Image (spheres, helix red, strand yellow):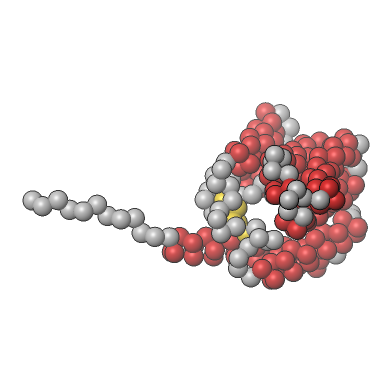
Amino acid sequence: MPPASGSRLAAALVHVYTAIGAVLAFLMVVAIQAREITMALWLFLAAMIVDGTDGFLARHFRVKELWPGFDGALLDNIVDYLTYCFAPVTLLWLGGYLPTGPLGWVVACAPLLASCFQFARTDAKTDDHLFLGFPSYWNVVAFYVVVLGLGPVATSALVLACTALVFVPIGYVYPSRTQTWWVANMVGAGLWLLAYAVIVASLPTPPAWVIAASLGYIAFYTAESLWLTARRRRQAPSPVEPAQLPV
């Protein structure tokens, strides 16, 4: 029996909702070009909310079943590259947070190229719902660079370190799909987004304790990711040793 037209329309609107992220990315670049950094940070938040909710909607409205010829995962990757990588790196460049000259170009291009690898790899997400390698959270990096007022040297060190982590096989938590401590991760992520909004609304002098609390979640997220990676490696089956041939 063919699906009802209303169900197909609802599923199609989920794809439209995801695609709105591309428009948000365009508005981010426009705001950054106009030196409206606070507005750009608000748009970062809007994009994170869209990205954090479209998966729930896609599963609820059965988009894979109702639109089998449309690759929603590819659409999501395109939008995420724009909002999580391209626009934040543009902010760091045009905002003056990166060095001038050839070094600045190298630092700016490094995450752009590394994220191309990250988004194109087929094993970017593991079967147990972890991101393999630093998951291109350049919007988060740019947010803290702005909020903490980091200079070009500190920003370059942070960007290059995160770029290197793209290629290190650490499993990072996927908060909305994790199989471990789902409630704690969702509550923590929600509170972090709330802290993000409070900080941006309070710029240029946000409360220090709110910044510290938001960094506390980042520390928890990192520690949990390292623990899950170590547990995953302990539980991995040992390679079968080749049988010894008789002498």
Q: Is residue 83 left or right of residue 167?
A: right
- Residue 208 visible in the snapshot: no
Q: Is residue 30 left or right of residue 117?
A: right
Q: Looking at the image, which residue is at 75% across and 48% down?
A: 2
Q: Nearer the viewer, residue 145 or 6?
A: 6
Q: Nearer the viewer, residue 220 or 22?
A: 22
Q: Looking at the image, which residue is at 59% across and 56% down?
A: 130
Q: How many marks can you see?
A: 0
Q: Nearer the viewer, residue 199 or 122?
A: 122
Q: Position of residue 193 (x, y in %)?
A: 80, 60
Q: Looking at the image, which residue is at 14% across and 51% down?
A: 245
Q: Position of residue 35 (x, y in %)?
A: 89, 39
Q: Is residue 154 left or right of residue 43?
A: left
Is 159 drawn above or below residue 105 in the view shown?
A: below
| Quadrant of the image occupied by residue 213 | bottom right
Q: Looking at the image, which residue is at 81% across and 40% down?
A: 22
| Quadrant of the image occupied by residue 23 | top right
- Residue 70 visible in the snapshot: yes
